[in-house]
Structure formats: C-alpha cells, structure tokens
Image (spheres, rainbow, N blue to C red):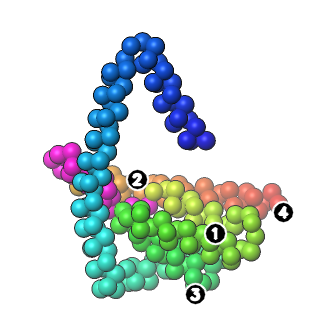
C-alpha cells in the first residue's frame, strides 16, 4: 500500500510539473537528490563501520552478554510466557541490546529470528501475546545511542551532533512506557472480553 502511495505521489508530481512547464525543476531535483543520497550513504559507511567495530569489541569483551544478563530479569517479566532458556529469549535480548546502541541493521535479523521462535513457541498462526509485546517494543523506537542520526548530523555540519542523545533517551522512555502500557491494557481488555 505504501509503495502505491509513493508511486502515485511521484506520478502526480511529474504530471503536474509537465502540465505547468516545470520539468526542468523536476529533473534538477531528481539528479540533486540522487547525488545527495549517494554522498550520504558513503558518508554513513564510516560511522556504521566504527559502531559495528565497537559492538564487535564489546561482544568479544563479553559486555553484550553482561548487558543481556542484566536485562534478563526485566525481559523475563515483560515476556512471562517465554521460558528463560528458550532460544526466543536470547534473540529478544540480542535485538534489544543492538537497538539500544542504535544498530537497527544488526537488530533486524535478531528480531526476525525472535519472531520465528515466538511463533514456534505459540504453535499457532495467530499473533501471540509475546509477539505483540515484542512488536510494540520494537515499534516504540528503543535507542540509547542514535548512531545513524549522529552520523547524519556530522555529515551536515552540526555544531553539536551528539546533543540528540538526551531527547532520544527521553523519547525512548516515553515511547517504551506508552507501548508497554497500551500492550498490557489491550491484553487485559481482551482477556476480560473473552471471559
């Protein structure tokens, strides 16, 4: 559906520009945007390589396992129907840890594996309580260090590229709290409704 909306917007814009004689501006915008996208992508490679290297060092030093172990009691309370030694719990902890460091690309494969394990655990084609909770947490935008945003701010000459960390932390706390409250509210409303 989103692809159709984007395609429709592009077609409407091009047709409008053709009707009113602004095709030169459209061509200029297309090529300028393509140049900006390539430059931004290349600029982000160095920062992503840096953060992935830091994550690898942290992993080799056992810091990620320590963080996952520290988060384990909290995550077990959020996902009470997932056994502590189940593979889904490991993938959930890895996904959350990667998201906390702003490594969405590294977190995505772990999230997909966690969803598969949660589906196997539920034994049903319908979304289980744990799957819904996991989706709510990921949608809330769990981030402590927004490395990609910092890289973009550096790229465009921000005087203080890391000042986004404080608002990001606040947004994470508010978003996560709201997502978990709504998740629990709808879960208990559904339980009450089904008797």
Q: Disc 2 versus disc 1: distance between alpha carbons? A: 23 Å
Q: Earlier in the sequence, mark 3 or mark 1?
A: 3
The residue lying toward the viewer, choosing from 159 and 27, is: 27
The residue carrying pointer 2 sits among few (fewer than 14), some (14 to 19) or many (20 or more) residues within 10 Å by Cα, namely some
Q: Is residue 21 above or below residue 128?
A: above
Label ID, residue 138: none
Question: Pointer 3: what residue?
Answer: 85
Question: Pointer 2: what residue?
Answer: 171
Question: Pointer 1: what residue?
Answer: 130
Circle 2 SS class: helix
Task: Locate residue 1, reporting x and y percent.
Answer: 61, 41
Circle 3 SS class: loop
In reply to whether residue 157 is colored magenta, the answer given is: yes
Task: Locate residue 170, reporting x and y percent.
Answer: 37, 55
> Nearer the viewer's eye, disc 2 or disc 1?
1
In reply to whether residue 42 is colored magenta, the answer given is: no
The region drawn magenta spans 142-161
Residue depicted at x 32% and y 22%:
25
Q: Earlier in the sequence, mark 2 or mark 1?
A: 1
Q: Disc 4 versus disc 1: distance between alpha carbons? A: 20 Å
Image quadrant in which the C terminus is located: bottom right
């Amino acid at each position: 559906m989103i692809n159709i909306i984007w395609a429709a917007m592009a077609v409407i814009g091009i047709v409008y520009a053709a009707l009113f004689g602004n095709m030169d501006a459209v061509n200029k915008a297309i090529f300028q945007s393509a140049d900006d996208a390539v430059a931004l992508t290349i600029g982000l490679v160095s920062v992503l390589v840096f953060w992935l290297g830091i994550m690898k060092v942290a992993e080799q030093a056992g810091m990620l396992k320590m963080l996952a172990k520290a988060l384990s009691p909290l995550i077990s309370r959020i996902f009470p129907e997932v056994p502590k030694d189940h593979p889904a719990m490991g993938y959930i902890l890895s996904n959350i840890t990667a998201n906390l460091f702003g490594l969405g690309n590294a977190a995505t494969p772990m999230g997909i594996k966690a969803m598969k394990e949660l589906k196997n655990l539920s034994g049903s084609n319908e979304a289980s309580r744990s799957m819904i909770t996991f989706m709510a947490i990921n949608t809330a935008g769990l981030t402590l260090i927004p490395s990609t945003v910092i890289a973009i701010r550096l790229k465009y000459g921000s005087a203080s590229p890391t000042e986004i960390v404080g608002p990001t932390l606040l947004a994470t706390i508010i978003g996560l709290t709201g997502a978990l409250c709504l998740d629990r509210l709808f879960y208990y409303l559904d339980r009450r409704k089904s008797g």
